């Protein structure tokens, strides 16, 4: 498979897993988010706190999935409906060859496979028909998780074989498209375009960290993770910090579930931050900001990197009318600015969600 931008970056998928918990108080969160710490020797973002996920693999696009899904009674119409999206479609979601699996299916398979490889969490569907009234995913524990996790991680067996032997089907229909991030061009040698999905669970499952890929893992609330980041107790990679900030304004998992279902078909604008240096920090702008380059291709280095290098962040901000940016004073302290309607009908990073009826 030759992808259009394969010489510039790899494609990957990531999964935000939210599990219902009992809130400590009336105003507390009734869910926690699953994250883990990459080992120090990781080739990409070592020691960072991330959501489960990883690079797209040829098994995610295997023709064997067609046979398994057909045998499980999954209708072609239900699968085709995964690509029924009205909004923005970055290239990662585009299927280049009609003989391949639809990318809106194979990227979900990638996210599910990586989540199982890294943390032993297997999300399964109700025969894969996609017609369940529940927005919540189910997880399976009644099998030898550790052995299958090792075999798939080490390449001895495949994710499709796991489902074939268990008689299950991956829960692609209750993975909700959430966002799409592209590593900034400054990381020339190691870039990823990543499709983020969200799954909600009615209870918190036990997880099984893969020792080579997971140094530590946590279930915690968005605000607790963000506060630990600010206290420099852990370091959240920028997309994770952004997505947790969006989530932090919604404390009820049922509201998030309703929102994710409603937003699932609204598309995902490619979020590739563009950097500007400032006198007292670094500025990253996103689409819609006055400083975001017109028709940015995600490949070119823009010539204005040091255009404002002698100005403080506040003065740069005052020159713009439209703001969609993050200002960093160091690696653990960032401030978000967005005075526009959030892209693609999404949660607002400043919590201005009054326009969203699902919330």
Image (cartoon, rainbow, N blue to C red):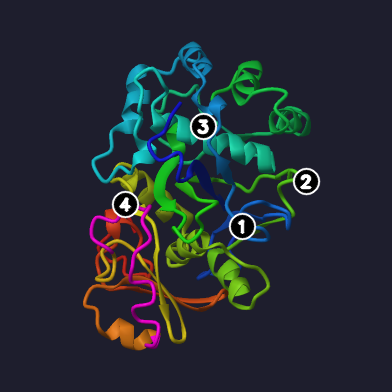
Chain-order first, disc 2 or disc 1 = 1
Q: Residues within 10 Å of mark 4 (few under 14, many from 20)?
A: few
Residues under labels 1 and 3: Cα distance?
23 Å
Q: SS at mark 2? A: loop
Query: Which residue is identified by label 1?
Result: 45
Answer above or below: position of 333 versus 239: below
Stretch in magenta = 293-312
Q: Regarding mark 4 in the picture, which secondary structure is present there?
A: loop
Q: Which of 45 and 71 lies nearest the eye of the viewer?
A: 45
Is residue 242 or residue 39 the one in the foreground? 39
* Residue 150 x/y as whole percent: 75, 32
Judge whether residue 198 can be spotted in this image: yes
Image location of residue 120, percent across then percent down = 69, 39
The residue at 36%/18% (across/down) is 76
| Alpha carbon separation for disc pair 1 and 4 | 23 Å
Direction from residue 299 to residue 242 in the image, left or right = right
Along the polypeptide, which appears first: circle 1 or circle 4?
1
Q: Which mark is residue 53?
A: none
Q: Quadrant of residue 271?
A: bottom left
Per the image, label 1 sits on a secondary structure element best described as loop
- Whichever of labels 3 and 4 marks the residue nearer the N terminus, that label is 3
Q: CA distance from mark 3 to mark 4?
A: 27 Å
Q: Please name the residue shown 34% across and 64% down the image.
A: 302
Q: Which residue is mark 4?
A: 297
Question: Upstream in the sequence, badge 1 or badge 3?
Answer: 1
Q: Residue at x 32, y 54 (%)?
A: 358
Q: Is residue 22 above or below residue 268?
A: below
Please give the residue where the numbered disc 2 appears in the rendered image.
Answer: 211
Residue of label 3: 109
| Mark nearer the viewer, 1 or 4 | 4
Task: Tell me which corner region of the image, top left, top right, bottom left or bottom right, holds residue 114.
Answer: top right
Is disc 3 surrounded by few (<14), some (14 to 19) or many (20+) residues within 10 Å? many
């Amino acid at each position: 498979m030759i992808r259009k931008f394969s010489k510039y970056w790899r494609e990957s998928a990531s999964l935000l897993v939210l599990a219902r918990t009992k809130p400590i108080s009336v105003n507390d969160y009734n869910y926690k988010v699953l994250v883990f710490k990459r080992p120090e020797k990781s080739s990409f973002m070592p020691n960072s706190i991330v959501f489960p996920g990883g690079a797209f693999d040829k098994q995610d696009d295997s023709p064997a999935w067609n046979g398994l899904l057909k045998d499980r009674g999954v209708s072609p119409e239900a699968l085709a409906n995964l690509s029924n999206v009205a909004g923005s479609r970055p290239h990662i979601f585009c299927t280049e060859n009609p003989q391949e699996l639809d990318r809106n299916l194979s990227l979900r398979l990638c996210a599910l496979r990586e989540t199982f490889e890294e943390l032993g969490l297997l999300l399964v569907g109700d025969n894969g028909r996609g017609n369940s009234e529940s927005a919540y995913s189910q997880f399976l524990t009644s099998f030898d998780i550790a052995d299958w996790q090792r075999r798939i991680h080490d390449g001895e067996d495949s994710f499709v074989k796991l489902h074939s032997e268990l008689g299950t089907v991956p829960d692609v229909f209750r993975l909700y498209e959430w966002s799409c991030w592209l590593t900034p061009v400054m990381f020339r040698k190691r870039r990823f375009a990543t499709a983020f999905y969200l799954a909600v669970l009615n209870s918190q499952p036990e997880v099984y960290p893969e020792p080579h890929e997971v140094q530590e893992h946590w279930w915690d609330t968005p605000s607790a993770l963000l506060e630990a980041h600010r206290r420099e107790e852990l370091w959240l990679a920028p997309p994770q910090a952004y997505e947790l900030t969006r989530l932090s304004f919604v404390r009820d998992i049922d509201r998030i579930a309703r929102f994710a279902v409603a937003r699932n078909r609204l598309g995902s604008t490619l979020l590739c931050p563009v950097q500007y240096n400032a006198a007292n920090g670094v500025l990253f702008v996103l689409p819609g900001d006055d400083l975001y380059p017109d028709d940015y291709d995600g490949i070119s280095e823009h010539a204005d990197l040091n255009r404002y290098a002698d100005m403080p962040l506040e003065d740069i901000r005052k020159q713009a009318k439209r703001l969609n940016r993050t200002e960093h004073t160091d690696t653990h302290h960032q401030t978000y600015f967005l005075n526009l309607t959030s892209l693609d009908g999404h949660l607002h990073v400043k919590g201005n969600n009054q326009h969203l009826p699902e919330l």
